[in-house]
Amino acid sequence: AAGVIQSPRHLIKEKRETATLKCYPIPRHDTVYWYQQGPGQDPQFLISFYEKMQSDKGSIPDRFSAQQFSDYHSELNMSSLELGDSALYFCASSFRQGRTEAFFGQGTRLTVV
Amino acid sequence: KQEVTQIPAALSVPEGENLVLNCSFTDSAIYNLQWFRQDPGKGLTSLLLIQSSQREQTSGRLNASLDKSSGRSTLYIAASQPGDSATYLCAVGNNRLAFGKGNQVVVIP
């Protein structure tokens, strides 16, 4: 069965650079979520989209932005990167805004040096 | 704000024993509760989803119960195997998911 696909899997950036993470949800899923998991931490919700519109916003820094495109894939843009942004970034998708099972991608490991 | 607590934080059991992992949450107005498995540095694998109207779900050796009124869920893993060693995360949600810090499990051969 198709799963959530994230790219790239690993990314190394320098401080103050910009990074773009991509997410391709499971076909026919209409909701995409982004989570950040710091070392030894539980995943923290960043932002979600339902039918290409932002549906919920969590603890996402102003330096980050995201969008969902017409083909339902989503991108998380991160600017002015800081050392503290080093983390695993997960994308998840579901159907009907969380009323069904959420499936997570394998994550993008971002390292800021 | 939803608070999710998982007890115990870590446990080791000999192979063959049953595992009991506990999760509690503060806000019972949830759509559903999910249990995930995470291996070190890896992604989150969904194990079971319990919708708010359900009391339990079963998949193979896994059984999860949900008591919304008391804000609790329990994950049972029968006849544990070394391959069950991982961190198990409980998450509850209304759209966004709020995660606990996980139960880190080691099954000793």
Image (cartoon, coloured by chain):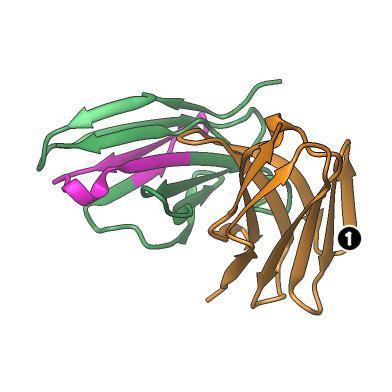
Compare residues A111 and B19 and report the one nearer the observer. B19
Compare residues A17 and B8 and report the one nearer the observer. B8
**Image position, residue B64 (x, y; %):** 83, 54
Q: Is residue B13 left or right of residue B3?
A: right
Q: Is A104 rendered above or below residue A37?
A: above
- Can residue A30 be seen here? The reply is no
Magenta stretch: give its range.
A66-90
User: Which residue in the protein does label 1 denote?
Assistant: B54
Identify which residue is drawn at 74% across, 41% down.
B14
> SS of the residue at dot 1?
loop
**Image position, residue A34 (x, y; %):** 45, 46
Q: Colour of chain A?
A: green
Q: Is residue B77 left or right of residue B107?
A: right
Q: Colour of chain B?
A: orange
Q: Is residue A109 left or right of residue B35?
A: left
Which quadrant holds the N terminus of chain A?
top right
**Image position, residue B13 (x, y; %):** 72, 46
Magenta-drawn stretch contains A84: yes
